[in-house]
Amino acid sequence: MTIIETIPPRNPHYTSKPFISVVIPVRDLEWVRLANCIKSIYLQNRPNPSDCIEVIIADYGSSEEKLSEMLKMIEPYNCVVYRCSPEHAPLWSLSIARNIGIRRAKASYIMTLDADIILEQNVFLATMEILNKQHRTLLISRVRNLHQINLQEINLPMDYDKLSENCFPMRPGCGGLMCAHRHLWYNLRGFDERMKGWGAEDDDFRGRAAKHGWVQKDLQNHVFEKGKTKVFHQHHVRPWLVASEQITAEQHSELAIENKRIFKQSASIKRNDEKWGMYV
Protein backbone atom coordinates (compact mmCIF):
# COMPACT_ATOMS: atom_id res chain seq x y z
CA MET A 1 0.00 0.00 0.00
CA THR A 2 1.32 3.45 -0.93
CA ILE A 3 1.27 5.79 2.05
CA ILE A 4 2.17 8.98 0.16
CA GLU A 5 -0.36 10.17 -2.41
CA THR A 6 1.05 12.35 -5.18
CA ILE A 7 -1.19 15.12 -6.52
CA PRO A 8 0.69 16.71 -9.45
CA PRO A 9 0.21 20.28 -10.67
CA ARG A 10 -2.49 20.75 -13.29
CA ASN A 11 -0.16 22.63 -15.63
CA PRO A 12 3.51 21.98 -14.80
CA HIS A 13 5.32 25.26 -15.34
CA TYR A 14 8.75 23.82 -16.00
CA THR A 15 10.17 21.39 -18.51
CA SER A 16 13.71 21.40 -17.15
CA LYS A 17 15.22 21.07 -13.71
CA PRO A 18 14.13 23.92 -11.38
CA PHE A 19 16.83 26.13 -9.90
CA ILE A 20 15.25 25.85 -6.44
CA SER A 21 12.70 23.60 -4.75
CA VAL A 22 10.55 25.07 -1.97
CA VAL A 23 9.05 22.63 0.55
CA ILE A 24 6.03 23.86 2.52
CA PRO A 25 4.74 21.53 5.29
CA VAL A 26 1.01 21.80 6.10
CA ARG A 27 -1.80 20.22 8.08
CA ASP A 28 -5.36 21.58 8.39
CA LEU A 29 -4.37 25.25 8.06
CA GLU A 30 -6.27 28.46 7.48
CA TRP A 31 -5.46 28.33 3.79
CA VAL A 32 -5.36 32.10 3.33
CA ARG A 33 -1.90 32.04 4.90
CA LEU A 34 -0.71 29.40 2.45
CA ALA A 35 -2.21 31.33 -0.47
CA ASN A 36 -0.29 34.48 0.49
CA CYS A 37 2.88 32.43 0.92
CA ILE A 38 2.65 30.71 -2.46
CA LYS A 39 1.84 33.93 -4.29
CA SER A 40 4.94 35.56 -2.79
CA ILE A 41 7.00 32.63 -4.12
CA TYR A 42 5.75 33.03 -7.67
CA LEU A 43 6.38 36.78 -7.50
CA GLN A 44 10.07 36.19 -6.82
CA ASN A 45 12.60 37.75 -9.15
CA ARG A 46 14.86 35.04 -10.57
CA PRO A 47 18.52 34.86 -11.64
CA ASN A 48 17.27 34.29 -15.21
CA PRO A 49 13.71 34.95 -16.46
CA SER A 50 13.42 31.35 -17.68
CA ASP A 51 14.48 29.85 -14.33
CA CYS A 52 11.84 27.57 -12.85
CA ILE A 53 10.73 27.19 -9.24
CA GLU A 54 9.38 23.92 -7.88
CA VAL A 55 6.82 24.37 -5.09
CA ILE A 56 6.16 21.25 -3.02
CA ILE A 57 3.35 21.13 -0.47
CA ALA A 58 3.94 18.33 2.02
CA ASP A 59 0.52 17.66 3.54
CA TYR A 60 0.95 15.50 6.61
CA GLY A 61 -2.47 14.48 7.84
CA SER A 62 -5.01 17.07 6.65
CA SER A 63 -8.61 15.92 6.68
CA GLU A 64 -10.37 15.17 3.39
CA GLU A 65 -12.40 18.36 3.76
CA LYS A 66 -9.35 20.53 4.38
CA LEU A 67 -7.44 18.85 1.57
CA SER A 68 -10.27 19.61 -0.85
CA GLU A 69 -10.26 23.26 0.26
CA MET A 70 -6.50 23.49 -0.25
CA LEU A 71 -6.51 21.91 -3.70
CA LYS A 72 -9.15 24.38 -4.84
CA MET A 73 -7.14 27.28 -3.42
CA ILE A 74 -3.88 26.30 -5.16
CA GLU A 75 -5.48 25.69 -8.58
CA PRO A 76 -4.00 28.92 -10.05
CA TYR A 77 -0.50 27.82 -9.03
CA ASN A 78 1.72 24.99 -10.18
CA CYS A 79 2.33 23.13 -6.94
CA VAL A 80 2.87 19.43 -6.48
CA VAL A 81 1.24 17.99 -3.35
CA TYR A 82 2.55 14.96 -1.49
CA ARG A 83 -0.10 13.87 0.94
CA CYS A 84 -0.03 11.49 3.90
CA SER A 85 -3.57 10.77 5.08
CA PRO A 86 -4.66 11.13 8.73
CA GLU A 87 -4.71 7.33 8.93
CA HIS A 88 -0.93 7.28 8.48
CA ALA A 89 -0.26 10.62 10.20
CA PRO A 90 -2.20 10.54 13.47
CA LEU A 91 0.05 13.17 15.05
CA TRP A 92 1.58 16.20 13.36
CA SER A 93 5.34 16.11 12.86
CA LEU A 94 7.02 19.11 11.25
CA SER A 95 10.18 17.02 10.80
CA ILE A 96 8.45 14.23 8.88
CA ALA A 97 6.42 16.62 6.73
CA ARG A 98 9.53 18.52 5.69
CA ASN A 99 11.45 15.34 4.98
CA ILE A 100 8.68 14.03 2.72
CA GLY A 101 9.12 17.11 0.54
CA ILE A 102 12.92 17.19 0.70
CA ARG A 103 13.25 13.58 -0.48
CA ARG A 104 11.14 14.35 -3.55
CA ALA A 105 12.61 17.75 -4.47
CA LYS A 106 14.24 17.98 -7.90
CA ALA A 107 16.45 21.06 -7.57
CA SER A 108 20.04 21.24 -6.35
CA TYR A 109 19.03 23.86 -3.78
CA ILE A 110 16.18 23.02 -1.42
CA MET A 111 14.39 25.52 0.82
CA THR A 112 12.04 24.67 3.66
CA LEU A 113 9.48 27.41 4.17
CA ASP A 114 6.69 27.67 6.72
CA ALA A 115 3.20 28.15 5.29
CA ASP A 116 2.70 31.40 7.22
CA ILE A 117 5.65 33.19 5.58
CA ILE A 118 5.50 35.97 2.97
CA LEU A 119 8.68 36.77 1.02
CA GLU A 120 9.68 40.09 -0.47
CA GLN A 121 10.51 39.86 -4.14
CA ASN A 122 14.31 39.53 -4.02
CA VAL A 123 14.63 36.84 -1.37
CA PHE A 124 15.56 34.15 -3.92
CA LEU A 125 18.06 36.41 -5.70
CA ALA A 126 19.83 37.18 -2.43
CA THR A 127 19.65 33.53 -1.38
CA MET A 128 21.39 32.33 -4.53
CA GLU A 129 23.96 35.12 -4.31
CA ILE A 130 24.93 33.86 -0.84
CA LEU A 131 24.85 30.14 -1.62
CA ASN A 132 26.74 30.44 -4.91
CA LYS A 133 29.61 32.21 -3.16
CA GLN A 134 30.08 29.47 -0.58
CA HIS A 135 28.71 26.05 -1.42
CA ARG A 136 28.76 24.64 2.13
CA THR A 137 26.35 27.20 3.59
CA LEU A 138 23.07 26.74 5.47
CA LEU A 139 21.01 29.87 4.92
CA ILE A 140 18.55 30.87 7.62
CA SER A 141 16.49 34.01 8.11
CA ARG A 142 14.97 35.92 10.96
CA VAL A 143 11.41 37.05 10.31
CA ARG A 144 9.25 40.09 10.98
CA ASN A 145 5.82 39.56 12.53
CA LEU A 146 2.99 41.36 10.78
CA HIS A 147 0.43 43.23 12.85
CA GLN A 148 -2.77 45.16 12.14
CA ILE A 149 -3.01 43.34 8.83
CA ASN A 150 -6.09 41.51 7.62
CA LEU A 151 -4.60 38.43 5.97
CA GLN A 152 -7.68 38.02 3.79
CA GLU A 153 -7.10 41.43 2.23
CA ILE A 154 -3.40 41.18 1.38
CA ASN A 155 -2.98 41.92 -2.33
CA LEU A 156 0.48 41.18 -3.66
CA PRO A 157 2.55 42.67 -5.18
CA MET A 158 0.78 45.99 -4.50
CA ASP A 159 0.80 45.56 -0.70
CA TYR A 160 4.51 44.89 -0.17
CA ASP A 161 5.10 48.46 1.06
CA LYS A 162 2.11 48.14 3.37
CA LEU A 163 3.54 44.96 4.89
CA SER A 164 6.92 46.60 5.38
CA GLU A 165 5.28 49.51 7.20
CA ASN A 166 3.14 47.29 9.44
CA CYS A 167 5.59 44.79 10.86
CA PHE A 168 7.52 44.43 14.09
CA PRO A 169 11.34 44.45 14.16
CA MET A 170 13.01 41.13 13.39
CA ARG A 171 12.47 38.53 16.06
CA PRO A 172 15.31 36.23 17.20
CA GLY A 173 15.59 32.62 16.12
CA CYS A 174 15.06 30.93 12.78
CA GLY A 175 13.15 28.11 11.16
CA GLY A 176 10.59 29.86 9.00
CA LEU A 177 13.10 29.70 6.15
CA MET A 178 16.11 27.42 5.74
CA CYS A 179 17.95 26.73 2.48
CA ALA A 180 20.96 24.66 1.47
CA HIS A 181 22.34 22.48 -1.29
CA ARG A 182 20.70 19.06 -1.35
CA HIS A 183 24.02 17.53 -0.23
CA LEU A 184 23.46 18.85 3.30
CA TRP A 185 19.88 17.61 3.58
CA TYR A 186 20.92 14.16 2.37
CA ASN A 187 24.17 13.94 4.33
CA LEU A 188 22.31 14.63 7.61
CA ARG A 189 19.21 12.62 6.57
CA GLY A 190 16.90 15.56 7.06
CA PHE A 191 15.14 16.58 10.26
CA ASP A 192 14.93 14.18 13.19
CA GLU A 193 11.73 12.19 12.66
CA ARG A 194 11.46 11.25 16.31
CA MET A 195 10.35 14.81 16.94
CA LYS A 196 6.58 15.23 16.95
CA GLY A 197 4.39 18.29 17.27
CA TRP A 198 6.53 21.38 17.01
CA GLY A 199 9.74 22.62 18.64
CA ALA A 200 13.55 22.15 18.54
CA GLU A 201 13.69 20.73 14.98
CA ASP A 202 15.42 23.79 13.55
CA ASP A 203 17.98 24.24 16.33
CA ASP A 204 18.76 20.53 16.12
CA PHE A 205 19.36 20.65 12.36
CA ARG A 206 21.45 23.81 12.62
CA GLY A 207 23.60 22.23 15.30
CA ARG A 208 24.23 19.15 13.21
CA ALA A 209 25.04 21.24 10.14
CA ALA A 210 27.63 23.17 12.15
CA LYS A 211 29.23 19.94 13.38
CA HIS A 212 29.32 18.80 9.76
CA GLY A 213 31.40 21.87 8.91
CA TRP A 214 28.79 23.96 7.13
CA VAL A 215 28.75 27.73 7.61
CA GLN A 216 25.46 29.35 8.68
CA LYS A 217 24.40 32.73 7.40
CA ASP A 218 21.34 34.85 8.15
CA LEU A 219 19.73 36.33 5.06
CA GLN A 220 18.83 39.44 7.05
CA ASN A 221 22.51 40.15 7.73
CA HIS A 222 23.29 40.12 4.02
CA VAL A 223 23.47 43.48 2.29
CA PHE A 224 21.77 42.92 -1.05
CA GLU A 225 22.19 45.79 -3.47
CA LYS A 226 18.59 45.72 -4.70
CA GLY A 227 17.03 45.31 -1.24
CA LYS A 228 13.54 43.78 -0.87
CA THR A 229 14.68 40.72 1.08
CA LYS A 230 12.39 40.94 4.12
CA VAL A 231 10.70 37.78 5.38
CA PHE A 232 7.30 38.35 6.99
CA HIS A 233 5.40 36.09 9.39
CA GLN A 234 1.59 36.11 9.15
CA HIS A 235 -0.22 36.29 12.46
CA HIS A 236 -2.08 33.25 13.77
CA VAL A 237 -3.20 31.88 17.10
CA ARG A 238 -0.40 30.08 18.89
CA PRO A 239 0.13 27.27 19.54
CA TRP A 240 -1.91 26.39 16.45
CA LEU A 241 -1.93 22.66 17.21
CA VAL A 242 -3.87 23.41 20.37
CA ALA A 243 -6.03 26.15 18.83
CA SER A 244 -7.09 23.78 16.04
CA GLU A 245 -7.85 21.08 18.63
CA GLN A 246 -5.39 18.60 17.12
CA ILE A 247 -3.77 18.10 20.53
CA THR A 248 -4.35 19.36 24.06
CA ALA A 249 -2.22 22.04 25.70
CA GLU A 250 -0.79 19.36 27.98
CA GLN A 251 0.19 17.16 25.02
CA HIS A 252 1.76 20.16 23.28
CA SER A 253 3.93 20.85 26.31
CA GLU A 254 4.93 17.19 26.65
CA LEU A 255 5.95 16.96 22.98
CA ALA A 256 8.01 20.15 23.20
CA ILE A 257 9.85 18.81 26.25
CA GLU A 258 10.54 15.49 24.52
CA ASN A 259 11.85 17.25 21.41
CA LYS A 260 14.25 19.30 23.49
CA ARG A 261 15.43 16.13 25.22
CA ILE A 262 16.16 14.50 21.86
CA PHE A 263 17.97 17.64 20.71
CA LYS A 264 20.19 17.83 23.80
CA GLN A 265 20.97 14.14 24.20
CA SER A 266 21.57 13.05 20.60
CA ALA A 267 25.25 13.23 19.70
CA SER A 268 25.24 11.86 16.14
CA ILE A 269 24.92 14.35 13.29
CA LYS A 270 22.97 11.82 11.22
CA ARG A 271 19.43 10.94 12.25
CA ASN A 272 16.77 8.56 10.95
CA ASP A 273 17.52 5.54 8.79
CA GLU A 274 18.13 5.47 5.04
CA LYS A 275 14.40 5.51 4.33
CA TRP A 276 13.90 8.95 5.92
CA GLY A 277 11.10 10.92 4.29
CA MET A 278 10.10 8.14 1.92
CA TYR A 279 6.99 6.61 3.53
CA VAL A 280 6.13 4.15 0.75
Image (cartoon, rainbow, N blue to C red):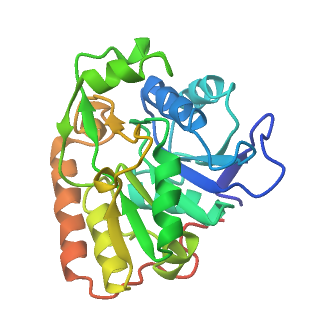
- Using the rendered view, name the quadrant where residue 119 is placed: top left
Residue 136 visible from this viewpoint: yes
Q: Residue 173: x percent and y percent?
A: 21, 54
**Rendered residue at 15%/47% (across/down):** 250
Question: Is 195 placed above or below 82 here?
Answer: below
Q: Is residue 267 left or right of residue 228?
A: left
Q: Residue furthest top?
A: 153
**Rendered residue at 57%/29% (across/down):** 70
Question: Is 264 placed above or below 246 here?
Answer: below
Q: Residue 134: x percent and y percent?
A: 47, 74
**Rendered residue at 41%/37% (across/down):** 228
Q: Nearer the viewer, residue 263 or 249?
A: 263
Q: Nearer the viewer, residue 241 or 179?
A: 179
Tally of marks = 0
Q: Nearer the viewer, residue 221 or 54?
A: 221
Q: Is residue 119 left or right of residue 242?
A: right
> Where's the C terminus, which quadrant?
bottom right
Q: Residue 68: x percent and y percent?
A: 62, 27
Question: Is 184 placed above or below 52 here?
Answer: below
Q: Residue 181: x percent and y percent?
A: 54, 69
> Where's the N terminus, which quadrant?
bottom right
Residue 195 visible from this viewpoint: no
Q: Residue furthest front?
A: 225
